[in-house]
Image (cartoon, helix red, strand yellow):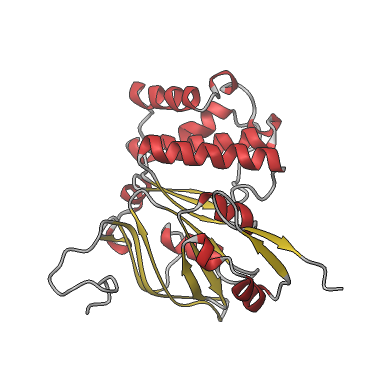
């Protein structure tokens, strides 16, 4: 079996369609091993969320998949090795929403979302009517049509997250990488943003690879979870197979109770005394 074959596949058989395929990914930063042989597959249209304790390598994995850092091993997007994709072509395939995106001071919502059209604007060229129309369409689709002239810094946390998603959608990418998309939001805005991501995924045939700290929310929305620990995949599968008291106690050193829910397990921390 080749390094790119799926477990259980036979020689000569076509592999399942994959938006992301990672094999034996190893990343060192500052002389320290962050990822130590990670394998990961995300099917087209799937939502996979990476969980794990602090320092497990979750954000590093997303950055490597997005082509923002390099390591040893293989990363392929929609069947093409990421090393073979030019930066402009890669930006048409994958869009990343970072934990804390850098926003130039005084930038308006419209101009920020317009940055998503950069891969389509020729060097030294200007945005076209089609680029402007794409931004208007995205803003209207996310109920942000009245926010175009507002400075991004004046918006609430939930509104800013919608704008960050709008820029990603304006890129026309079919793979969304979301690094802790709800980390600074209250529970109401967390739900609002994740419901929006799920809606967009279904309406636009998007694939989502995310990282999250909140385990209950991760299990509520993702099709599959991948548990990273010490730079390796410790478990992967449906939420009910990964969010177990045994695995969370072992890798998070947490005392919890896992309660089945209608859409996924709920993780409840318990006092030790």
| Rendered image quadrant of residue 266 | bottom right
Report the residue at 25% width, 60% height from top. 16
Report the residue at 26% width, 73% height from top. 8
Q: In the rendered image, is residue 135 in sight?
A: yes
Q: Is residue 1 above or below residue 220?
A: below
Q: Is residue 235 above or below residue 94?
A: below
* Pick the front one: 153 or 198: 198
Query: Where residue 225 sits in the image (x, y, percent)?
Result: 50, 62
> Furthest residue to the left?
12
Q: How many marks?
A: 0
Q: In the rendered image, is residue 123 in sight?
A: no
Query: Where residue 203 sits in the image (x, y, percent)?
Result: 39, 34
Relative side of 60 to 174, left or right: right
* Pick the front one: 194 or 221: 221
On-image quarter of the N terminus: bottom left
Relative side of 33 to 78, left or right: right
Report the residue at 60% width, 46% height from top. 102
Q: Is residue 259 above or below residue 158?
A: below
On-image quarter of the C terminus: bottom right
Query: Where residue 180 sits in the image (x, y, percent)?
Result: 60, 53
Report the residue at 64% width, 69% height from top. 53
* Pick the front one: 81 or 220: 220
> Furthest residue to the top?
146
Q: Is residue 21 above or below residue 31?
A: above
Query: Where residue 61 sits in the image (x, y, percent)?
Result: 49, 65
Relative side of 41 to 235, left or right: left
């Amino acid at each position: 079996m080749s390094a790119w074959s799926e477990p259980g596949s036979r020689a000569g058989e076509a592999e399942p369609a994959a938006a992301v395929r990672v094999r034996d990914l190893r990343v060192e930063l500052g002389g320290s091993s962050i990822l130590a042989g990670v394998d990961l597959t995300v099917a087209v249209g799937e939502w996979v969320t990476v969980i794990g304790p602090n320092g497990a390598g979750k954000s590093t994995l997303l950055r490597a998949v997005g082509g923002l850092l390099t390591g040893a091993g293989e990363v392929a997007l929609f069947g093409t090795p990421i090393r073979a994709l030019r930066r402009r072509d890669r930006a048409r395939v994958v869009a990343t929403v970072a934990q804390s995106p850098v926003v130039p001071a005084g930038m308006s919502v419209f101009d920020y979302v317009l940055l998503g059209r950069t891969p389509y604007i020729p060097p030294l060229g200007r945005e076209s009517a089609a680029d402007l129309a794409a931004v208007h369409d995205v803003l209207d689709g996310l109920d942000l049509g009245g926010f175009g002239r507002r400075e991004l810094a004046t918006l609430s946390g939930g509104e800013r997250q919608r704008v960050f998603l709008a820029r990603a959608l304006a890129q026309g990418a079919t793979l969304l990488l979301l690094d802790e998309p709800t980390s600074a939001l209250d529970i109401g805005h967390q739900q609002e943003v994740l419901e929006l991501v799920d809606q967009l995924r279904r309406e636009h045939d998007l694939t989502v690879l995310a990282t999250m700290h909140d385990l209950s929310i991760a299990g509520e929305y993702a099709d599959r979870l991948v548990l990273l620990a010490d730079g390796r995949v410790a478990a992967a599968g449906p939420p009910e197979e990964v969010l177990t008291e045994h695995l969370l106690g072992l890798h998070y050193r947490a005392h919890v109770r896992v309660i089945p829910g209608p859409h996924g397990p709920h993780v409840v921390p318990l006092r030790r005394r």
